[in-house]
Image (spheres, grey):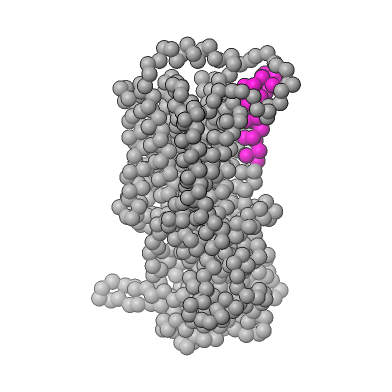
Amino acid sequence: MTSPTQESSGPRWGMVIDLQKCVGCDSCTVACKAENRTPPGVSYNVVVEMETGTFPNVRRVNIPRPCMQCDEPPCVTVCPVNATYKHDNGIVVIDGDRCIGCRYCITACPYGARSFDFGESYVDEVQGADVLQSPEYGVDRGERAPWKSPWGTVRKCNFCMHRLERGEEPACAETCIGDARFFGDLNDPESVVSKLAASPGRSASRKRSEPSPASTTCVEVSHMSTTTKTPDAPAASPARRWWSHVPHEPFLTPRNRRLWYGFLGLVLLAGSWFVVARLTQGVQVTDLTSQMPWGAWVAFYIYFVGLSAGAFLLSSLIYVFGMHQFERIGRAALLSAIVCMGVALAFIGLDLGRFDRALSTLIHFHWTSPLSWEVRFYTMYVALLAVELVFAIMVQRRTTDPIRAHRWMRILGIIGVPLAIFGVHGGTGTIFAVVKARGMWFGGLFPIVFVVSAIVSGTALVMAIYFWQRRGAGKRPSLKLMQQLSVVLVGAIFIDLGLMFYEFIVPILAFEHHDKSIMGIMAFGPYWWSFWFFQIGMLVAALIICMSPLKKRVGWLAAAAMMVIVGILGVRFNIVVPPLVPPVIDGYPTNIYFPTINEWMVAAFLCAGGALAYSLICEWQPIFDPDPDDTEAIAAEQQQEVPA
């Protein structure tokens, strides 16, 4: 791998395409598929038809779209495992045996030049199609089969490197009947491509996020412009270990326990078939395509990361900032943060084309990739949460000195707060914010939006869990506690809505047409229901909390919290999906996506699995038991409250 400014002693391969000579015959597309034996949905060389001018002076131009082999390729920058890199000869290549299939590079490519191998084959059209192998990079991979590269990985044009090694030109250049493609060594000033690349009449047909023409090794030449539009207490004896089971307040009544675990069992049973289908058939069971690389599972991933970070930040109000009025939900918040992070990682793991390589993200580090950093932040974050929860349980059970334990919890919280804000969820927002090729993603405000919405969703989650656990255990939830939590919730909601206002108003005032088209898709396109019913519906939750007659009823406060939980899910869906709908290049078709039944059932399975893990830990440990010193005060408080 070489830096963009490093000089290479060997050739630097490049291609120049004369747009005036391209007749749109698609012979390059056919030759490329035949040469590289690409499966359905994978095409390295497409020709896009574009109309230029205004009526009646209108012309149709053919725009070939191979990989531009950028000198500063954004796909290389975002790859978390260094699977894609720039070769010494100037070609951007992919290591198919290292690629994890996250498709981050596809979202970053401003040309739409990358494809994902979903594992499909032409077996119905061509006898023995599975026996045919791709000759990419000269690697003999044998018969095409699941869990065998390039199945489940990203693929792209590499100028037919296997042909270059034999001294031949790329198949597209050799086949072009209009003699529109010129291939050669850009380091040779006498070569045709060097002279054409230096031609003042060239046009690279760039989007605003594309590298400059001088930094690309695939250039299109034409005489016309075709620019296109991304409390202190005494210590007790430590003889009893914290992990041992001791009698504590029941998590649920016997009847509710049977109903709850029966419901979870049915969901897990129904979803298990779809999980097996995903594990055996890959991500082709989804509605994703190479131009729509991310969908519902990525939305659920960032949603649960937000729930986790928000729940942890709420617990930090207790253990770091000393707001002990929330003490009784501290352990529940920490456990919620741990379980939600586990569910988030399960979602993103199943979204990988090669989830069997997921742990390689810990081995291969790429410092420019936000996703690579996030893997390490998540690991530290989960370890910190687990240790802090152990201390909180030990304090409740008096198996350690509470003063010393609270001191350690404060230290862990002080470390964890910036880790959660800047590393975990702010970092998750950065995954999107660095992608210039997609509207409504690129910008410095995005990580802040993620952090604020995390506080909103995490607080709402803890409120809902507390309410339903108390109901399920046959006890009355504390109105005072719910009201105190609702103050935190409504404040965060209004800040979140304010940031959303600026997200929308700035592109409108700046006449940013690409972002405005995405906002139109959100509000009036196929996902309008998610925007108006869920995302904007959070205003109803804020009104419930602010209205005097309703905020005195604990049931209404719980309903508002659940509305927020659903609303933030709608926000996450609108973050991921609508920006991927418009084509990244003018002339590409508009992407159409809606989660399949498999995607929904896998999501239900993972959510039920997280709920089951949370419930079993609550059965085992005193997650909701009050601190012994607070028992009398809580009893007095409940006697004063009016039942909901």
Does residue 389 belong to the magenta stretch?
yes
Q: Quadrant of residue 385?
A: top right
Where does residue 33 sit, x and y in percent of width and height? 52, 79
Where does residue 613 sit, x and y in percent of width and height? 57, 39
In this rendering, the answer to whether 595 lies above or below 630 is below
Magenta region: which residues? Answer: 380-408
In this rendering, the answer to whether 357 lies above or below 423 is below
Residue 318 can be seen, yes or no: yes
Q: Residue at x 53, y 28 (%)?
A: 251
Where does residue 558 sit, x and y in percent of width and height? 40, 30
Q: Residue at x 46, y 54 (%)?
A: 599
Where does residue 129 sit, x and y in percent of width and height? 55, 79
Residue 23 horizontal side relative to residue 186, left or right: left
Residue 220 can be seen, yes or no: no
Residue 413 horizontal side relative to residue 502, left or right: right
Q: Residue at x 59, y 67 (%)?
A: 146
Front one among 470 and 488 = 470
Q: Residue at x 38, y 18 (%)?
A: 643
Front one among 397 and 517 = 397
Does residue 417 belong to the magenta stretch?
no
Position of the C terminus, as image quadrant, is top left
Position of the N terminus, as image quadrant, is bottom right
Residue 333 horizontal side relative to residue 166, left or right: left
Dominant SS of magenta comes to: helix
In this rendering, the answer to whether 635 lies above or below 580 is above
